[in-house]
Structure formats: structure tokens, C-alpha cells
Amino acid sequence: MLKWQTKEGYKKLLKDLVSIPSITHHDGELFMAEHLHHTLSSLDYFTKHPDYVRHHPLPDGRKLITAFVQNDPSIKETIILLSHFDVVSVDDFGEWKHLAFRPEELTEKIIENKELLHTFVQDDLNSGDWLFGRGIMDMKAGVALHMSMIEKATTGHFKGNVLMISVPDEEVHSEGMLAGVSVLRQLQEEYDIKYITCLNGEPSFTKYPGDTSSYMYTGSTGKILPGFLCYGKETHVGEPLAGMNGNVMAAEITRELEWNVDYVEKFREEATPVPTNLIQKDLKDHYSVQIPHAAVTLFNLMLFNRSLSDITDMLIKSAKSAALRLEDRLFERSKNVSEIIPFTPKKESIKVLTFNELYEHAVTKYGQEELDRRENMLQTNNPNADERELTIQYVFELASLCRDISPMIVLFYTPPFYPAVCSSDHPLIKATSDMVVSHAKHTFNSELVNVHYFSGLSDLSYIGFHGDSRDLSSFTSNFPLLGSRYHIPFDDMRELDIPVINIGPLGKDAHQWTERLEINKVMDETHPLIIFAMETLFDQAKNQI
């Protein structure tokens, strides 16, 4: 008897999933993996094929889950169903934090206090069967839908194989999917199958308050996190013009990059957001009357098709523009002061260089062995440090060793890195997405909008990689922790290179305490639409062979 094909069965499954507090980097992630494995194993198909539902451990002990259904060994075509089961924290729930993972009780409490809600949320409460809860839309609903598709596959419904992969840690560094890429490669060889599509189940995000459209995505936006270490010159506050304040340098970089439209990319009718600052601070660890001569500033930068080498060149150019303004301003201010206190102003020169250039200068001065020793010591003494903080400390240490070339601005990259991916023009995805949009219109009278890039970032970024070696080198050579503390499986990503599509439930207010899902729409429209999309993918794949 099928359990997850009705509204009642799906709702019970979803509430069970939401009830597990699988916050990233907390014990709930482990409990969630065990729960998924146990629940999937209860299906009759997996009692006969227990080895087809598996745990796969990450290096830190967490686990991702795969479930494989193959009804005809002669068929190789396989659809991957991708999801993540971790959620963000619940601090935003305030006094209702204890209800964050209890959807029925939380929904009742919200209804009782609906006067606290924005009018958009109140309108939703009056218009449908909404459930509230942390992770209910992002993305336990998608996990439950994929489990329902797996159950459907066990009946022999689809003309191909279905492989579900559900991972932890999408919300922080995507460590689950970074490990999952090699798992997918291993299973491809073990099962002797051919992946035709990776179908993600991330929710359809509204674009503005009151947006009622549903969206399908045929790609996912990329992201990099560039930083600038600004190393000036120390001096006493009584002689500020004898040095260079790192805070002033960082502020000028931020002024140059914040909201800079030169970094906006367009793809047809879509565009990336402007860059924005995420971290800016000086690196003094205590108060003193020495100026803060070193500071750092980091930026969120979203990508479509622009190459990594072009991005590096643009960032260096921006830093040089900021450096020239700093040089001119300091000289101008010095001349103004010299009219009050006679002295001869000297124009300062600020070097702009990449981390790799700084590293090579340090190797020349101190030798490779000494730099390896310092990096190992830094990582050993800070095993649980935030990757961005560890990167900043390492670049700062190298700059301190090379203060003979200061003042300087050093470009570097920190985790995470999400490559952009887009399959809109792939023949299989284009044919399928067109048919899905048409089916939604004629069957459900629903205007499903096809978007080329999912803007919320997703694990689809790691399903393929097309950058050439030179392009990649300009990025990786300036990424201090890459290969030691942070790993990206570029080779496996290139080998997979699977077209992608995302069809998920309509939800609202992800990462907010009003996160919610409309259950009727999920089962009346999204569930059958995913079935249709999978049927179409298998049919179109056969036609295009």
C-alpha cells in the first residue's frame, strides 16, 4: 500500500521530517539522516533491496543518504533527485522557539496571534491550508516530495531509474553536496547507469511581497566571497600622517565596490544583484593609541557567466582605483596640514596585489618550509575556527611578514564558492521545461514561470563545472584554504556535467519565523507536476538518443 501519494500521507511525512531539528552543524543533522534511512527502508522495495538505500559518511561524521530504484537492469537512464535536509537556526522565533519544529502547534499559535503578522501573511492565512515551521519550505517539503517520487518509482511507474540523494549542510558550506559529488560518481560506476538530469526540489521563492507566481528554475546562481586585506603603516595617533590607517583603506575599497553596477551580470531578462559588503573590521585585538594599520573587507558577489579570471581582473582594477584615491587624498590632506605645521609632504604609494603574489614574495624572503610551518601551526591551533576568520588571519600573517612592501591591498578569496550553472539551452531541459510550463497552464491553470538562475544559491552548483584550467587557476591560486581546510571536487564535477532543473513547492518567508507552505497547492499541483516532469525527461531522453 502506498503511503505518500495522498495529501494526508504527505502531510504526515512532512510533519515527521520537520519535527527533527536538523540545524546545520547540530546533532539533529545526524538524527535526520538516520530517520530518512529508516523511513525509506520501510518501503517494500528496499526490504527486498536493502543495499539500495545507504548512508554515506562525510569526513566529520555526518551522513548523506541515497536511495536507488531500478526496475529494469537493462535501462541505464537515471534521474537524480537532489535535496538537503539541514535547516537554519530558530533564534528568530523568539518566545515561540520551542514551537519552531512543531508545525501544527506553531500554526495554531500564529493564527491566535495573527494581528502580529504582516498583512501579506494574514492574507495567506485566510486563503488556504498553510503550515508554519522551520524548514517546512526550505526544504523539508522538497525532501518529502522526493521520497514520494521514490515510492512512486518502486511501483514501476517511470521508464527509467531514480536516484535520490539528500545531504546535510547546504545552508552553510554545502559540505554535504561537496561530498555527494564523488558519491554520485561512485554509484554511477557501481550501478552502471547514465545520469540524464539532476532534478532539485528547492522551493519556489517569491520575488517580492505579495508575489503569487510559481517558478521553475533551469540553473542556479554562482557566488564568490572576495576579500581585501588592507595593510597600511602603523603610527601613534599623535602622528597620524606618518602612517596609513587600515580602516580608511578598507572603507575606500567598500566605497568602490558597494552597489557597483559594473559587477552586475545580465542573462536575457535576469540580472545578478550588485555586490555588497558582508564583513569589514580592523585587526587590532586590543585598545591602544596605535592606529589600526590593518583591516579587512569581504564582499558577496553573485555570478552568471563571467569567468573567474575576469572577476579577478575586475577586482584588482577596483582596488587600484581605490588605492589611487587614497594616495591622492592623503597627499592633499598632508599639504593642507603643512600650511599649519611646516613640513614637506611626501606622496605615499600603495601596492595592489593578489594573495598569490604576496605568497610568492613571502616564499622568496622566508622559504617554502617556513610558510608551510606557519600555515600548519595556524590551522592546528584553530581547529574549529570559522573558515573566513582563519583565511583572514593567514593573509594578515603573510602581510606582516612582508611589511617591507607595505602599504598594500591584497585580494584573496574565502569559502564558500558556488559555481554558476545554467541548462536553459540544453536540448533535454529546454524541451522538458517548455512542456512542463504548458502542462501547468492547461492542467492547473497555473502560470509557471521559467527562471534561468535560482537566486537563493543551491547544491545544483556542484553538478558540473566548465571553467578551463587558466580561468580556474586565477581563482584557486588566490584561495588560501583551498585544498587544506576547504575542498571542491572540480574533477568529479567536470565528469558529472549533468543538466539541471529545479521544480519545488511554493513556499514563503524562508529563514524567517513566518516560513510557511501551502499544503493543498503542493499536493494538487506540485506533486503531479514533478511526476509529469520526470515522465517527460525520460521520454525526451529516449527521443534525443
Image: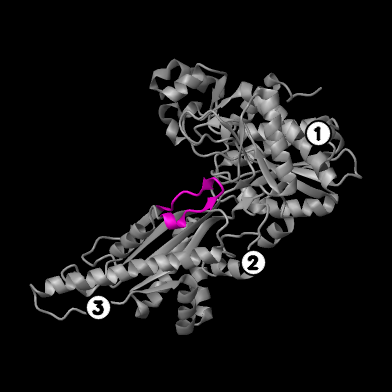
Residue at figure coordinates x 16%, y 74% from the top left: 335
Q: Is there any visible trace of residue 165 in the rendered image?
A: no
Q: Position of residue 346 (x, y in %)?
A: 22, 79
How is colour applied across the structure in the image?
one colour
Residue at figure coordinates x 66%, y 35% from the top left: 143
According to the image, label 3 marks what residue? 347
The magenta span reads: 261-277
The local secondary structure at tag 2 comes to loop
Q: Is residue 181 above or below residue 475?
A: above
Residue at figure coordinates x 58%, y 35% from the top left: 204
Viewer-proximal residue among 31 and 104: 104
The local secondary structure at tag 3 comes to loop
Mark toward the start of the polypeptide (3 vs 2) = 3
Depth-wise, is mark 1 or mark 3 nearer the camera? 3
On the rendered structure, is 435 left or right of 221? right
Distance from label 1 to label 3 (Cα)? 72 Å
Task: Report the residue that reaches farthest toward the right.
Answer: 74
According to the image, label 1 marks what residue? 153
Mark 2 nearby-residue class (10 Å; few <14, some 14–19, many ≥20): few
Mark toward the start of the polypeptide (1 vs 3) = 1
According to the image, label 2 marks what residue? 468
Whether the magenta-drawn stretch holds residue 262 is answered as yes
The amino acid type, in three-letter code, at marker 1 is Ala
Mark number for residue 86? none
Q: Position of residue 316 (x, y in %)?
A: 44, 68
Q: Is residue 331 above or below residue 306?
A: below
Dot 1 and dot 3 residues touching (CB under 8 Å) = no
The local secondary structure at tag 1 comes to helix
Viewer-proximal residue among 296 and 106: 296
Q: Is residue 489 above or below residue 357?
A: above
